[in-house]
Image: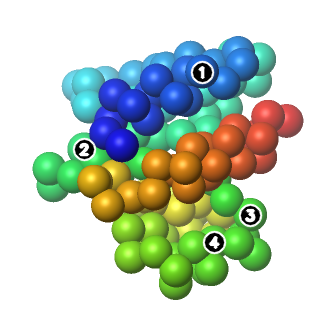
Amino acid sequence: MNQKEVIKYSLSLPNTYEDYPFPKDNNSITMKHKENKKWFALVMNVKDKIYLNVKTDPSYSELLRSSYDYIIPAYHMNKEHWNTIIISNKVDDSLVKELIEQSYELTKK
């Protein structure tokens, strides 16, 4: 997956939109719910790498981090509830989509 594919997939979920919430930063994109305006994904360029932050169930977070070397505690967010996926050619696309969907569901309310 790449950044465009992450954004496209996120926008395929119902009632979502992309936002650029940080002035002077056109590289960080939040994917949000239209109803509650909460974000379920944050896409950033960090040191020339694409980072995707997604919300996860805390009981699942550590398992993900220990199972995949490209999943780390969230960059600049609550590390109990959020994980960062370092997007590259080696990520499992189906897992990334699954984690985006889970984050979408966890932030709906």
Q: Quadrant of residue 72?
A: bottom left
Tag 2's secondary structure?
strand
Which quadrant does the N terminus fall into?
A: top left
The image quadrant that residue 60 belongs to is bottom right
The residue wearing badge 2 is 45
Q: Alpha carbon of mark 1 to alpha carbon of mark 4: how far?
A: 24 Å
> Which residue has dot 4 on it?
61
Left/right of residue 93 with respect to residue 60 in the rendered view: left
Closest to the observer: 45 or 60? 60
Q: Position of residue 8 (x, y in %)?
A: 46, 23
Disc 1 on helix, strand or loop?
loop
Query: Residue 75: percent from the left, percent from the top?
Result: 40, 60
The residue that appears at 40% across and 22% down in the rendered structure is 20
Q: Which residue is mark 1?
A: 12
Q: Residue furthest left?
A: 48
Which of the two marks, 1 or 4, is nearer to us in this view? 1
Residue at image mark 3: 57
Q: CA distance from mark 4 to mark 2?
A: 22 Å
Q: CA distance from mark 3 to mark 1?
A: 22 Å
State whether residue 36 appears in this view.
Answer: yes
> What kind of residue is marked 2?
Asn
* 25 over 89 or under it: above or below: above
